[in-house]
Amino acid sequence: MKCYAIFDLDETITTRGTWGRYVSLSVKGKPWKLVGLWARAGFGQLIYKVCSTERISVKRGMLRWSLSGQSRDALEALADKFADNEIANGLRPGAVRQLDIHRAAGDKIIIASAGADIVVEAIAKRLGIDEVICTKLAWKDGKCARYFGSENCYGPGKLDMLAKRLETFDDFQREAAHITMYSDSYSDLPVLKFADKGVAVNADAKLTREAAIHGFETVDWSK
């Protein structure tokens, strides 16, 4: 039986989210941009909660106040520095151990994250993980566009993107596969339920409740 280990990234492998910190770094030294960025993020979160708009609208607003219009070379260089710092200082010790366990067992390791590819792929590369499913940025004339290049890899959308990627693997057969999903977030409930084994990592309150209902394992990877 082929085993697949699916890891969320933000607050599962890393101790903190990556998107907000990365976009903040991208406008460092531009206080008017930073104020606008977080004002837009706060307003977007309010609208998302009150009006049930799509979550990607929040990220899109942040994108337009930060990365859009900046050169790809500069943003990739910044992502490399950001990833180096995450590897050195921002990983959950338990996540590193579990990655090593799956790697030693010969399991297929995949990161499935709502984060932007420019950061997620840089971190995955340093962890030796080739398979990444995440939200894609779009580029135009060598600069970051004002829109995303894919659907948001979040909630049911993450499950859809994961299922499509799995079907591209030559050796994948769902009935002959064992899938483990690791996540901290309730938003990943669709993928956790799809997996043969769901693991709640330093879980938020809503996921902790769901873990008890669905029989997910709960772990603390902070040490």
Image: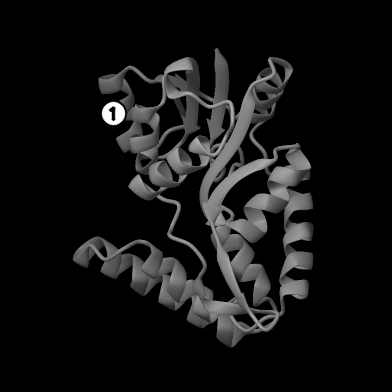
Work out whether residue 50 or residue 103 is closer to the camera in this orientation and state it: 103
- Up-down relation of residue 145 to residue 205 (above or below): below
**Residue with the mark numbered 1:** 209
Residue 5 seen in the current view:
yes
Residue farthest top in this picture: 1
Camera-side residue: 44 or 165? 165
The outermost residue toward the bottom is 32
The picture quadrant where one finds residue 44 is: bottom left
Instruction: Report which quarter residue 96 is drawn in.
Output: top right
Name the residue located 72 percent from the left edge and 74 percent from the top edge. Answer: 72
| Relative horizontal placement of residue 43, taking residue 170 as reference (left or right) | left
Q: In what element is the residue under mark 1?
A: helix
Q: Is residue 74 left or right of residue 48?
A: right
Give the camera-side residue of 18 and 76.
Answer: 76
On the image, the x and y values in percent for residue 198 come to: 42, 24
Measuring from the top left, give residue 222's x and y in whole percent: 59, 30
Residue shown at 48% from the left, 28% from the top: 181
Residue 56, percent from left and from top: 40, 64
Identify whether 7 is placed above or below 125.
Answer: above
Kindly identify the residue that appears in the image at 64 percent across and 34 percent down: 92
User: Is the N terminus in the top left, top right, bottom left or bottom right quadrant?
Assistant: top right
Q: Amino acid at mark 1?
A: Arg
Q: Quadrant of residue 160?
A: top left
Tell me if residue 142 comes above or below residue 10 in the rendering. Answer: below
Quadrant housing the C terminus? top right
Q: Is residue 24 left or right of residue 185?
A: right
Query: In this orientation, does residue 223 appear?
Result: no
